Amino acid sequence: MQPVDNLHVLAFEPLTPPRALRERYPITEAAAQTVYETRESIKRIVRREDQRLLAVVGPCSIHDTGAALEYAGRLARLAGEMRDRIVIVMRAYFEKPRTTVGWRGLINDPHLDGSFDMNEGLRRARELLLRINDIGLPTATEMLDPISPQYITDLISLTAIGARTVESQTHRALASGLSMPVGYKNSTDGNVQVAVNAFLSARRAHSFLGIDQDGQSCVVRTTGNPDGMIILRGSSAGPNYDAATVVRTEQAMEAAGLLPAIMIDCSHANAGGDHTRQPHVWREVLRDHIASRNAVIGMMVESYLYEGKQPILADRSRLRYGVSVTDACVGWETTERMLIEAYEALKG
Ligand SMILES: O=C[C@H](O)[C@H](O)COP(=O)(O)O
Ligand SMILES: C=C(OP(=O)(O)O)C(=O)O
């Protein structure tokens, strides 16, 4: 008989069950409080019952947990000082979708060398999330996979479904079971309706293939997730944070029976891939949308300790500390300045 199965599979390697990792790094009371309060705040913000700005700020991806923790310490201080006007959530992105190929993030490849030690990646991600939430700073992430959430979602306050997966049935079903609000991004070619469709779909109950806390493969049955927003991230045709697109997005959400709530991603195609444009986008959004209290309830920024990005070198010891290895970020001083500007603009 000719071999017909698993022709392109090299190996099946077991994964630590989620429960084992959660027992090793149990959520603390302080971290649970951070998560609970932030999720509730975000729900109120998207329902427009809370006028504070939602700011999702942090590295494009985390590759060095030490640097991420230093960043978190700085951001936690600002988040505490600004909490009366801004709800600051740190980007803690561990799974990267790629246009073609490239490093896939800390959960997938924690040693940055193609060894894909995912048990270690999940461990590092959970330990870091716990430490960040423990100091009172909430976290946001993109979810790419229906298995990994069971390891970390108790420590996540906001999830994004990205531009490359927003039309995927698996991701919509996954979002329908998540415990936190979800932001659905427009597609890379600028289609906003697919994000609205994703939100509509995720509000309904679904069943999908996943795992339980013991790592047992199972049918995950969900109730549907009512809390969400659309994230405008620009497209291959250019930025899409202009008033006309915001109005069209509001109308599309209303037509679908959704409460309009929009976040502007100041990075990605809204900055034309140029991190130095993020402060400009930030200011324009503050001036044109936030000040008028329309449906724009939040902004996203890719920011790290130091600006720019660097290639992943074969000699990992030569990587520059606190610099992104995926999209270029604004540095800390710029980030602080942007947040202070927003805080001032939100006065009164
Ligand atoms: O946010 C990160 C990137 O924009 C996304 O992962 C795609 O990256 P790539 O186009 O470099 O693959
Ligand atoms: C990949 C990201 O965004 P997008 O899906 O908008 O490209 C991201 O925010 O890291």
Image (cartoon, rainbow, N blue to C red):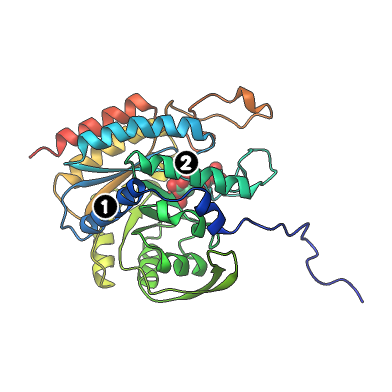
* Disc on res. 37: 1
* Outermost residue toward the right in this view: 1
Look at 87% across and 71% down and name the residue there: 3
Give above or below for 39 relative to 173.
Answer: above
Q: Position of residue 71 (x, y in %)?
A: 40, 31
Q: Position of residue 59 (x, y in %)?
A: 44, 37
Q: Determine which quarter of the picture holds residue 199.
A: bottom left
Using a 10 Å C-alpha cutoff, classify the residue at mark 2 as few (fewer than 14 neighbours), some (14 to 19) or many (20 or more): many
Give above or below for 184 relative to 219.
Answer: above
Q: Quadrant of the C terminus?
A: top left
Q: Position of residue 146 (x, y in %)?
A: 53, 63
Q: Secondary structure at mark 1?
A: helix
Give above or below for 291 relative to 344.
Answer: below
**Residue bearing mark 2:** 128
Using a 10 Å C-alpha cutoff, classify the residue at mark 1 as few (fewer than 14 neighbours), some (14 to 19) or many (20 or more): few
Q: Secondary structure at mark 2?
A: helix
* Disc on res. 80: none
